Structure formats: structure tokens, C-alpha cells
Image (cartoon, helix red, strand yellow):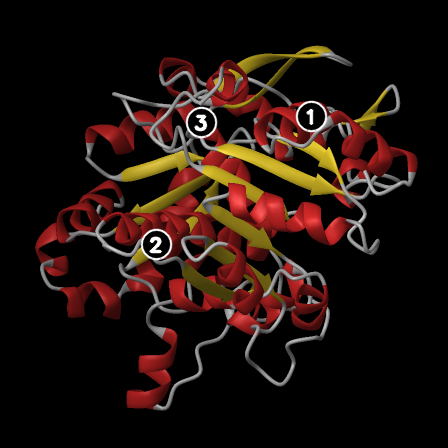
Amino acid sequence: MDSSEAESGAGPLAGVRVVEFAQVIAGPLAGTLMADLGADVVHVESPVTGDDARRMGPAKDGVPLWWKVLGRNKRSVTLDLRRADAAAVVGRLIAWADVVIVTFRAATAERFGLDWDSVRAVNPSAVLLQITGYGATTSRRDDPGFGKMGEARSGVVHLTGFADGPPVHTGFSHGDATTGLMGAFAVAAALRRRETDPDRRGEWIDLALSDTLFRLIEWQVILHDQLGEVPGRAGNRLAVAPAAVINTYRSADGDWITVTSATTRSVRGIAGLLGLPEEEFATTAEQIARKDELDDGLRDWVAARTTAVVLKTMTAAQIVAAKVLDVADICADEVYRERESIVTVMDEELGPVRMQDVVPRLHRDRGRVWRTGAQLGADNDLVYREWLGMDAETLDQLQRSGVT
């Protein structure tokens, strides 16, 4: 690894090489998570328009903000995949990489030489993470897809909201985010398996945008299979709840407080706060039978007290409760400060900017945020000349012809 690679290589994935032929959120988030932990990630973009994510969301003084986080810790190179001359560069990038991330429709990936057969022909040790709307082996392999579509198909949206209202999507790119997270996890698993394989064979990871949220609702299929039930929306109480009391309640000073009672002890603690005999809530059946009484009573109890009093009283009674924080609360929160969960990074356009630090936290080799989202093509010379070993004449020709 040369000095330019070492600049980014702090963390347990240092030395892992990733190339992203991926746009917007799901695939690039998988790459960002790996880059945060030290992987060298090359993000390939159109030389004319770049990644659409560069223009998404709010901006300050004409500078889009979301990209600064989504594109952080990566190298940006430009390459027009539609040009014939690009195929040789694609091949060199695949040969260089340990991991290839692709988010094109299946037929498009095949046309660009980014499908599994093409990738392993160039680099048999490569791990291919392929993300599509409906899966690369289905009849809808070439249909377009975005995260919200995946959320709708997963069962999550059907379960989210109140019984008398419409289904509700969460307030962020939930399907994309969990796909990126599961993709990074799958890549790590594939790399670990490759280490123990004498032939260092790669792997094909095929993710549809509905897969991960569908998997995370562990009970939905078995409930339907064994009980014939189709759980519906139940607001903050959850359609299938692990405890008698799970809800949000509004305090006297207007804050929302989430209360969860996942143990007999905590349910009996709530009964005690409400002046009910704790011994009458000794079993799960007794608790569930009176869950509406507990819920209604707790709503009135919280409404009559300030947030500070509610949280202090519940902590003393070993009842799990938390104020629903907004981002201003988070930025001022003592525990977030103690965990150093927010880091300040220098950006060449905006100066110092704050964003989430690396997650998950590894204490021995934690990774770091060393860069915000790069300018388009900022690393063409580094990646193509130094990392891939392309000569100056070839690079000049590719640039003059608009390929890079």
C-alpha cells in the first residue's frame, strides 16, 4: 500500500479495496460503511453529471449537504461507462478490487461487464455486491427500483402508522439504509470466507431492496403461516409487541416520551406508579389482559408531570423510558457527547462541518472520518495513474475523448 492509500487506511478494513459502480444511497452507503472502517473505496461517476446524490437534499450557499456525508471517506473518479474505451478501464478497476458494488439493472450490469460472470472472469477472487429493485435472478430483474418501493414490498409500511390512518413510511431512506447495512455485513462475511479458501474464490451477493426489512420483521411470516394472522397498524404500540406497555406519551411540557416494559419487573413498576396492586401483574397473561388499563393510566400519569420528573421517576423505578429526541436535542445530549458520536470534519467548500462519527465503534481499531464527499473526479490521477498504473498518454487520451 502506498502513502496515498495509507491516508484513508485507518481501521479494521484497511487494505480492502472496493470499487463502486453505484449511485444514490443503498450501494454507496455500503461502501461508506466500509470506508469508515478503513477500506479504500473508489466511487465511479459520470464525468458530466456525477452521482445524482451530489444534488439531493438541502444546500448551503449552493453547496448540497447530504453528499458531504454520503460520499465521505471515498475517492471519486470519472468514467463514462457508455463509451467503448471505458471497458478496459472497468476491467482494470475490477482486477484491482477485492469488492465490486453494482446497482444497475441486471441487463445494464451485463452490458457494462459488471454482472457476476463478467466480474469473476476478470477477478475470480472478487466479491460482487449487486443491488437491484427486485433481485438479479427474478422475472423483474430489469425493473427500476428505489428504497421506498422496497419498504412497501417488505411488510414494514403496512405495519407502520395508526389503525385508523394510512400506512406510513419512516422519515428517512429506510429501505436503502438497511440494504446498505446488510450489504456491508454480507461483504465482510464473504471476505472472511475467502480468507479460509485455498483458492481465494470470490462471492456473488444478490440483494433486492425489499430483502433486508422483510428479514428484520422476524415474526410476520411464521404468524401468518401458523395462526393465519395478518397483523395491521397499531400506532406506537406495535402490531406484535414483546411487552404489555410499549407506547409514546406526551408530558406536561409537551415532549413525547417513549416507554417500554419488556420484563415483568418493569410492568409491575408501572402498575406501582399508577397505584395498582403490583401482585395483580405477576404473569404475562395478567399483564396482557390489562394492557389497555395500563396504557390509559400511564398516558394520564405522564400528562400530569414534566419530562424531567417522568424520566427521573421511571429511572428510579427501573422502567425504561426516553424522551423522543430531535436533532437539536441529540447535538446537545450528554451521552452523545460522552460517546463522541458527532465529529467535526474540514470540508474544502464549507469549512468545518459536523456529522455522525464512525459506527459501529471498535475500540482497538475504530476507523475515522478523514474526508467529506469529494469533488467530482478529484482522484482520477491518484486512482488511474498511481493505483492502476495507467500511463500518462493513455490517461490524456481518455480525458480528451470524454471517457474520464
Which of disc 3 and disc 2 is earlier in sequence? 2
Q: CA distance from mark 2 to mark 3?
A: 22 Å
Dot 1: element: loop
Seen from the viewer's position, the closer of residues 307 and 351 is 351
Dot 2: element: helix
At x 91%, y 40%, the residue is 401
- Residue 14 visible at all: yes
Q: How far from the left and from the top, in percent, is residue 350?
A: 75, 13
The amino acid marked with disc number 1 is Asp
Instruction: Identify residue for label 3.
Output: 358
At x 62%, y 85%, the residue is 139
Q: Nearer the observer, disc 2 or disc 1?
A: 1
Q: Seen in the image, is 88 located left or right of residue 206?
A: right
Residue 292 lies in quadrant: bottom left
The amino acid marked with disc number 2 is Ala
**Could you classify mark 1 by the number of other residues whose Cα lies within 10 Å: few (under 14), some (14-19), or many (20 or more)?**
some
Q: Quadrant of the N terminus?
A: top left
**Could you classify mark 2 by the number of other residues whose Cα lies within 10 Å: few (under 14), some (14-19), or many (20 or more)?**
many
Q: How far from the left and from the top, in percent, is residue 204?
A: 45, 63
Instruction: Identify residue for label 1.
Output: 379
Q: CA distance from mark 2 to mark 1?
A: 28 Å
Label 2–label 1 contact, CB within 8 A: no
The correct choice, above or below, for 376 with respect to 22 in the image is above
Q: CA distance from mark 3 to mark 1?
A: 23 Å
